[in-house]
Amino acid sequence: MSQIQDKLKKLMQTITIIQTSPGINSSEIANQLQTSTRTVQRYVKQLREAGLIIEASSGHMGGFLLRNGYKSNPFFLTPEERTSLTLVVNSLICAEGFPFKSELSSILNKISSNLFEMSNVKDDYLSIMLPPRGNTEKTKKLIIEIKEALNAKLKIEIEYDSFSSQQVNRRTINPYHVFLHDGFWYLVGFCNLRNEIRTFRIDRIKELQMLHEKFILDKEFDIDEYIKNSWSIAKGEKTKVVIKFTPPISKLISEAIWHDSQRLESLDDGCLVFTVEVEGTWEIKK
C-alpha cells in the first residue's frame, strides 16, 4: 500500500472512530490507530481543512465530536479477514457448480473500487474445491424465486421429482432455508402434504409457483439443530452405528472429525472402533 493510500486509510479510520464514539479524546484515537496523539491532531486538522466540522472540548472529559451530519461507513479488513475473503471469492468464482459467479464478480469489483486492501483478492494461492453438480442455470432461477418467497413469507407450490418415492407430485411448501451441500442446493421447509419439515433437492423441482398465501415462520427452527443428528443431511430414525476399522484405514479415520457424536476406541492391534449416533443409516452406509 502506498503512503497516500495509507494516509487516506488513517483519515477515514479517524472519521469512523469519532463518528462511532462521540467525545473520544486524541489519546484514545491514537491507541486505536497505533500512532501518536500529535499525529491524531494532525489528522483532525486536515479533516477540518477538508470541510468536516469536528468540534473539540478541553479538559479531563474533553474529546472530539462530528457535528455536520457527515455519514461514512468505510470498513477496513485485517490480514486474516482478507485471507478469508480471498479464499471464498476465488473458490466460488472458479467453481463450476456455483450459480452466482457473475454476480459475485460484480460485487467484488464494487468492493475493490472502494477498498485498497482488496487489491490482492484475486491471488490464486488459496481455493476450495466445489464439485460441478446439478443444473446451474435452473438452480439459480429457483433459488432466486425461493428467496423472494421466503422474504415475503409466502408459500410456494412445487412439482417435485422425489428420489425416495420415485414419483412426481405437487406439494405446498413453507420455505425456511436454502443451503449448498456436496455440490447440490437444498431447500428446507414445512411440507403441507406430509405435515412436517422436509428437505428437497432444488434441481429436482420441476416447477415452482409463488402463492398469495402467507405463512408464519417457525421461530424455533434452526438449520444447525435440524441437521445436527444426521450423518450428512438426511433425516430418519436415530440409530447407534458401530464400525471396526483395521489398519491402515483406522489411521485415516482417527485423523478427522466425522460427526459431533463420534466416539473412538483404539485397540492394541491398531484397529479402531468408531461409534456414532445418526438419524437414518443410508448416508453412512453410502
Image: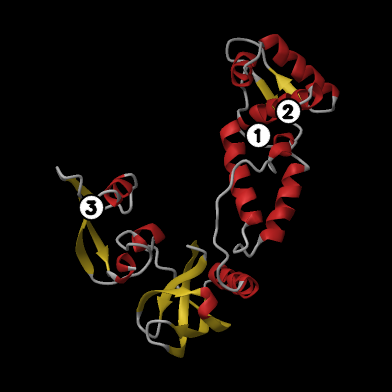
Indicate the quadrant where residue 284 lies: bottom left
Residue at 44% x, 69% y: name it: 217
Q: Which mark is residue 246?
A: 3
Q: Residues within 10 Å of mark 3 (few under 14, many from 20)?
A: some
Indicate the quadrant where residue 228 lies: bottom left
x, y percent for residue 178: 50, 66
Q: Mark 1 or mark 3, which is nearer to you?
A: 3
Residue at 35% x, 83% y: name it: 194
Residue position for label 2: 9
x, y percent for residue 89: 63, 49
Q: Quadrant of the N terminus?
A: top right
Label 3 is placed on what type of residue?
Answer: Thr
Residue position for label 1: 76
Q: Residue furthest left?
A: 268
Q: Residues within 10 Å of mark 1 (few under 14, many from 20)?
A: some
Q: Earlier in the sequence, mark 2 or mark 1?
A: 2
Label 2 is placed on what type of residue?
Answer: Lys
Instruction: Decide which of 267, 185 is in the foreground and name it.
Output: 267
Question: Are the two marked residues, 2 and 1, in contact with CB atoms closer than 8 angstroms?
Answer: yes
Q: CA distance from mark 1 to mark 3?
A: 50 Å
